[in-house]
Amino acid sequence: MSLTPRIGLVAGELSGDRLGAALMQRIRERHPDAHFYGVAGPQMRAAGCTALADAEELAVMGLAEVLGRLPRLLHLRRRLVRHFLRRPPQVFLGIDAPDFNLGLERRLKRHGIDTLHWVSPAVWAWRRYRLKKIRASVDTMLTLFPFETTFYQDHGVQARFVGHPLADEIPDDCGREAARALLGVSAARRCVALLPGSRESETERLLPVFLQAAALCRRAIPALQFVLPVASPGLMSRCRVATQQRDYAQLGIILLEGQARTALCAADAVLLASGTAALECLLVKRPMVVAYRLHPLSYLLVRPLLRVPYVSLPNNLLGRRQVPEFLQSEATPEQLSGALLALLQDPAAAARQVEPFDALHASLRRDAAGQVADAVLERICAQ
């Protein structure tokens, strides 16, 4: 191996930035002089990654939403290709952002650069035609879930299960009382956490519905309290204005700057947007109701391509409808509040939902950052 490993990284949005920073730390434990460069967020930059662009530039969700940003994204990818070909890394690792990274990885692989991808696109769920592109782009797919590795191997793609970083981070018991004390939430009253998504488009579509559902729940349980962790500073103003409207001001919703995990730990039940938050809720062992709304055009394009009966990770991991999920027109205040009240008013039903979560947590706890560091360094050693 070279005395100074050179590793190219492109991380998609804040979640990818967190993964990239953890990986850099694990590699630097063995190679303090390792050099990292690519698309990075604040955590990767703080860890010493030379940033060629910011990870937030890739934070685009939905097919319709991408169209307005497409010229800028294509220009960025061309610029990165030129940079990585002028200064080739020994290994390139794309972290999430598959629609951006796979095209970049394919071009780099054609020029002899080893390519890995961490966080598989949900090709097992929809758009399976991407398998051909993945084969042409990625030397090894590093997967978060064991069923993904099996799927890839069955379709002729080299894959390696590394576990999920959140399963490594989150303890078996996250402590409801301590979380409530930290947030100033009453220990004597039931609490619902509202997580309408981390992206502006998600919040725009789901927050009004979540607030209406919360109001319906409050009618049934007058002492119910609510916490709403706001994913980014840019969304705080929108959330504050929405929660202070006349119909919702009496709910007394506690707005938090981030602190999503603490909010989940404090809650008796959770209403959330489908995505990583559902997995995090599973790992803290809280009962949940999942909802999602895409741009109508995006949904029309996506719906025929879906190959699985569920959208939420808990249901896909278990292969059954363990968690209620409501999509598009089904995600109504009445449906969401009804599902929440079923959990809040029937402790046995809530306990049945979370019963398999302990075993799932244990199966995903694999030291993911260390496993990915091993995969990267093994690839460099083999050169």
Image (cartoon, helix red, strand yellow):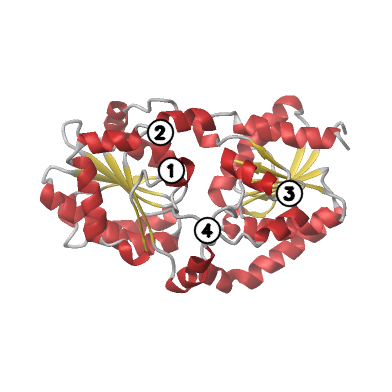
Specify the quadrant that holds the C terminus: top right
Is residue 183 in view?
Answer: no
Q: Are marks 1 and 3 in contact (CB under 8 Å)?
A: no
Q: For the point 41% across and 54% down, which residue is it?
A: 197
The answer to which of marks 4 and 1 sits earlier in the sequence is 4
Kindly identify which residue carries mark 1: 314
Q: Is residue 48 left or right of residue 317?
A: right
Measured as percent of width and height from the top left, residue 76 is found at 70, 63
- Judged from the image, the secondary structure of the residue bearing numbered disc 4 is loop
Pointer 2 or 4: first along the chain: 4
**Cα distance in 3D space between marks 4 and 1:** 16 Å
Q: Which residue is mark 3?
A: 156
Disc 3: CA contacts within 10 A as few (<14), some (14-19) or many (>=20)? few
Q: At x 44% / y 26%, what residue is drawn?
A: 171
Q: Nearer the viewer, residue 95 or 298?
A: 298
Quadrant of the rendered structure where residue 359 is? top left
**48 w.r.t. 334: above or below:** above
What's under tag 2, amino acid-wise?
A: Phe
Give the amino acid type for the residue marked by disc 4 in the picture: Arg
Residues marked 2 and 3 touching at CB (< 8 Å): no
Q: Mark 2 or mark 3: which is in front?
A: 3
Question: Could you tell me how far apart the alpha carbons at marks 2 and 3 are, in whole angstroms?
Answer: 31 Å
Q: Determine which residue is flagged by label 4.
A: 307
Residue at 39% across, 40% down? 281
Q: Where residue 19 appears, x then y in whole percent? A: 59, 40
Contact? badges 1 and 2 (CB < 8 Å): yes
Tell me the SS state at disc 1: helix
